[in-house]
Image (cartoon, grey):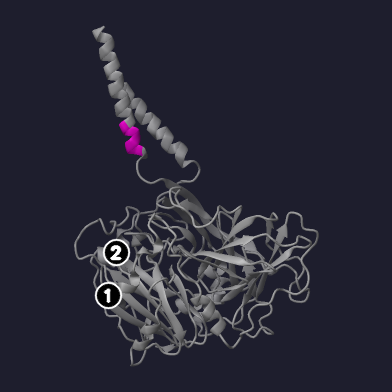
Amino acid sequence: MMGLLLLRSLSVVCLIYISSFLTLCFAGDPFVYYDWDVSYITAAPLGVKQQVIAINKKFPGPIVNVTTNNNVVVNVTNNLDEELLITWNGIQHRRNSWQDGVLGTNCPIPTSWNWTYQFQVKDQIGSFSYFPSTNFQRAAGGYGGIIVNNRDVIAVPFGTPDGDFTIMIGDWYNRNHSDLRKTLNGGKDLGMPDGVLINGKGPYRYNTTLVPDGIDYETFNVHPGKTYRIRMHNVGISTSLNFRIQSHNMLLAETEGSYTVQQNYTNLDIHVGQSYSFLITMDQNASTDYYVVASARFVNETIWRRVTGVAILKYSNSKGAASGPLPDAPNDVYDKTFSMNQARSIRLNTSAGAARPNPQGSFKYGSINVTDVYILKNKPAMMINGKRRTTLSGISYVNPDTPLRLADWFKVKGVYTLDFPNQPLTGAPRMGTSVINGTYRGFMEIILQNNDTSVQTYHMDGYAFFVVGMDFGEWTNSSRGTYNKWDGVSRCSIQVFPGAWTAILVSLDNVGLWNLRTQNLDTWYLGQEVYVKVVNPESTNKTELPIPDNALFCGALKNKQQPPHKPKSVSSSPTEGRSRMLLTMLMLVFSVFC
């Protein structure tokens, strides 16, 4: 009897031990794994064969579909003929600028090497994108969408859609990205694009003169009466696009991680690098298909007619092909007031939750004292030291051989200067690696002044900021009287119209070195960017993670680089692999203790 009781006691202890072991192993937020092979493929989206950048032979690349607080692991193998970095446009990388994928924080992945990104989508929801950040590669593809879903415990401020589409729109050139790069290096503009792609495909043949026969176009299959969520991303080079669906209203619901006041639009201007979510109900007569259009804005339509992307919305009971003229875009080629007023109308839904249960509007940004003010002014490209360059506040940024964050970690001196001016320089413009010194836990006001002739979109890695004002003319101190101090939308990319300014407020609570840049690829490539350094004066890994074990080294630290490891697939069956490992360990535990 005593032996039986002892055996039962041991069994209970074993079960408790195994249960504790399982809890320990499966505790924390889930991991999601992707395995990407980045390479060239031949495609002809506008009817001309050319080299495009594909991921796993797909152009555009796969959608990263995750949930708030997931840990994301992306193993990238670079099979291009040049170095590569992938940046996660809008993902905030809390405490982890090491995974940002820009030259200020990462050495690029050499050709034939692989590198694994690992980051957490901490306290985020919404629609974002990714793309290659170096060598003008985004002009050749390599981009895709990111979906960060709400956790089940967090309410979404609209009913569950009947379907979910990701749409990538952008201007496109038939020249390879390396040729476009040579054009800019040679001191010339890129000129008018050859067209607009929708999900990597050319336009539906709505016009037999403008669109050659045989072009592959995108079709969105829908059912009458159903409501769909459409996640829209402008991943182009430099062209603002107007998006519209013939005869359908678009209910704006979210932009770059923030739920918005839900308003209907018949069309919306989407500037380079921006992302939006619409809810669209299929409430039209299905006698024919409908046009889905993305066309160039603020241009001479007669000359730019070819810069138009056209896809097809097809009802399941449609009785015929789309025909007739495309739905009209706003007619304001020389007046951008309509577009600015449209942008001002996008406001934060302060009663909705987002990644956390508390309402978005509980952050009273309008009553927080500003600690730093920076006026960032851009101008048209100019000659500096014999090279055609763009500037921010009179400084044209130069990427050093050693990434800034890596230089800080290993105390490499002389890589950059911490002297970026609060006001634009009054003297001659210069080239350099000048960095903004941000105040940890400070509240920064940034005024973006666009003195160029085209719309510029600005993006800040690692952060979402509040858009509090925009207007034409030069910003002055009295402009603060026009700020929206209650429900300005929180996002990570914002347009600045030519001859106008946009003001943003950002809470500097994310430690690291963060890229602040124009999303317009040509002006970014020529130097229109800066980094913001945010340092916690207390040394602790609670506010910034340490350098990753797989860090790449270059520049002054290239001697630290070890030979590359053989790429390992992480996507085939991560759950199965972990289950086998746990089963093996449990068997060992059971054999030893039980």
Q: What kind of residue is marked 1? A: Asn
Tell me: residue 152, above or below residue 12: below
> Do callouts 1 and 2 mark residues in contact (Cβ within 8 Å)?
no
Please give the name of the residue rendered at 32% of the width and 25% of the height, measured from the top-left corner: 15
- Residue projecting furthest to the right: 319
Q: Which secondary structure, mark 2? A: loop
Whole-angstrom CA distance, mark 1 to mark 2, is 20 Å
The quadrant holding residue 577 is: top left
Q: Does the magenta stretch include residue 23?
A: yes
Q: Name the residue under label 2.
A: 511
Q: Seen in the image, is 545 located left or right of residue 354? A: left
In this view, the residue farthest toward the left is 538
Q: Name the residue under label 1.
A: 369
Any magenta on residue 26? Answer: no
Query: Label 1's element?
Result: loop
* Type of the residue with mark 2: Val
In magenta, the rendered stretch is 20-25
Residue 234 seen in this snapshot: yes
- Crowd band around label 1 with a 10 angstrom C-alpha radius: few (<14), some (14–19), many (20+): few
Mark 1 or mark 2: name the one nearer the start of the chain.
1
Q: Can residue 189 be seen in this view?
A: no
Disc on res. 378: none
Image position of 335 with respect to 23: above or below? below
Task: Give coordinates of residue 200: x percent, y percent.
Answer: 62, 64
Specify the farthest residue to the bottom. 427
53 or 285: nearer the viewer: 285
